[in-house]
Image (cartoon, rainbow, N blue to C red):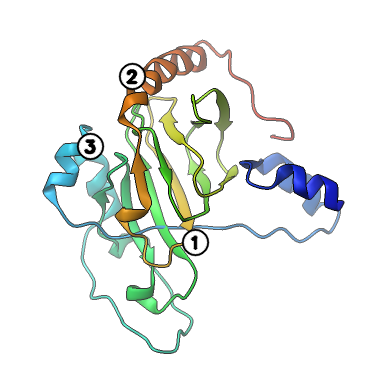
């Protein structure tokens, strides 16, 4: 990519589809993918989210673990079954996997994400963190922009980069749970990085209803390059 193209893309969401990555891999191109998560704290955050998550939370976690604090980071393996999910301020179920507090990560925070059928998040932005979301099961959409005027549909294996400060919301398009991995450039995965835009929640709801109806009718197509 030339420097002009890089400047044009700077600060814009970028989408990578699983189909595109497969085609690149067949040309012996190495593909790197990202992942993410974080632990939460209060029951008030759950009620404030206004969404029902109890059924999916039980499928994410069966036990707890003690976080580690390390001065010098070392390789650290995470078993998804040991993670403890909670609800973030944006209304997503998050199970933090990698943070400074857990394993000494200096630059990245990683969490598993779950969205119950036909639900959507609140409109929000990450004030200081770039994020990458990779869908590992299900069909979802991201709407973004100051008026949420742009839409990207995600299928299993698709990834999306969202720069810090970009307003967005996530939508589960189907009657199945969507599972994803979210990576942030906040190694603490703090709630304070999430800035809500409640005035746009009615817009998110209207867009979600439309996209879910179009998906049910088979009218939504994969992004360019998708399988």
Whichever of labels 2 and 3 marks the residue nearer the N terminus, that label is: 3
Between residue 50 and residue 194, name the one nearer to us: 194
Q: State the residue at coordinates (23%, 38%).
A: 53
At mark 2, the secondary structure is helix
Q: Quadrant of residue 97?
A: bottom left
The answer to which quarter of the image holds residue 173 is top left
Mark linked to residue 49: 3
Of the numbered discs 3 and 1, the one sitting upstream in the chain is 3
Q: Position of residue 194 (x, y in %)?
A: 36, 48
On-image quarter of the C terminus: top right
Percent position (x, y) of residue 90? 32, 40
The CA span between labels 2 and 3 is 14 Å
Viewer can see residue 1: no
Compared with 91, 198 (above or below) is above
Crowding near the residue tagged with mark 3, few <14, some 14–19, many ≥20 C-alpha atoms within 10 Å:
some
* Label 2: how many Cα within 10 Å (few below 14, some 14–19, many 20+): few
Q: Is residue 115 left or right of residue 28?
A: left
Q: Which residue is mark 2?
A: 202
The answer to whether residue 31 is visible is: yes
> On the image, numbered disc 1 is attached to which residue?
185
Q: Nearer the viewer, residue 125 or 179?
A: 125
Pick whichever, 72 or 55, lies toward us: 72
Name the spot of residue 9 as percent of width and height, x first. 72, 44
- Gap in Å between the C-alphas at discs 1 and 2? 29 Å
Residue furthest out toward the left? 43
Element carrying mark 1? loop
| Tag 2–tag 3 contact (CB < 8 Å) | no
């Amino acid at each position: 990519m030339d420097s002009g193209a890089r400047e044009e893309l700077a600060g814009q969401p970028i989408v990578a589809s699983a189909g595109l990555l497969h085609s690149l891999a067949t040309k012996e191109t190495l593909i790197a993918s990202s992942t993410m998560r974080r632990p939460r704290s209060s029951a008030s955050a759950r009620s404030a989210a206004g969404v029902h998550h109890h059924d999916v939370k039980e499928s994410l976690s069966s036990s707890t673990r003690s976080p580690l604090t390390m001065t010098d980071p070392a390789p650290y393996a995470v078993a998804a079954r040991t993670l403890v999910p909670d609800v973030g301020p944006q209304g997503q179920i998050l199970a933090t996997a990698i943070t400074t507090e857990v394993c000494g990560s200096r630059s990245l925070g990683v969490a598993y994400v779950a969205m119950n059928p036909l639900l959507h998040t609140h409109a929000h932005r990450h004030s200081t963190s770039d994020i990458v979301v990779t869908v590992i099961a299900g069909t979802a959409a991201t709407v973004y922009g100051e008026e949420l005027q742009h839409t990207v549909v995600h299928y299993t294996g698709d990834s999306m980069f969202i720069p810090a400060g970009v307003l967005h919301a996530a939508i589960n398009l189907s009657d199945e749970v969507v599972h994803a991995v979210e990576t942030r450039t906040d190694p603490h995965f703090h709630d304070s990085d999430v800035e809500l835009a409640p005035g746009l929640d009615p817009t998110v709801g209207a867009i979600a209803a439309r996209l879910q109806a179009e998906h049910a009718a088979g009218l939504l197509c994969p992004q360019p390059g998708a399988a």
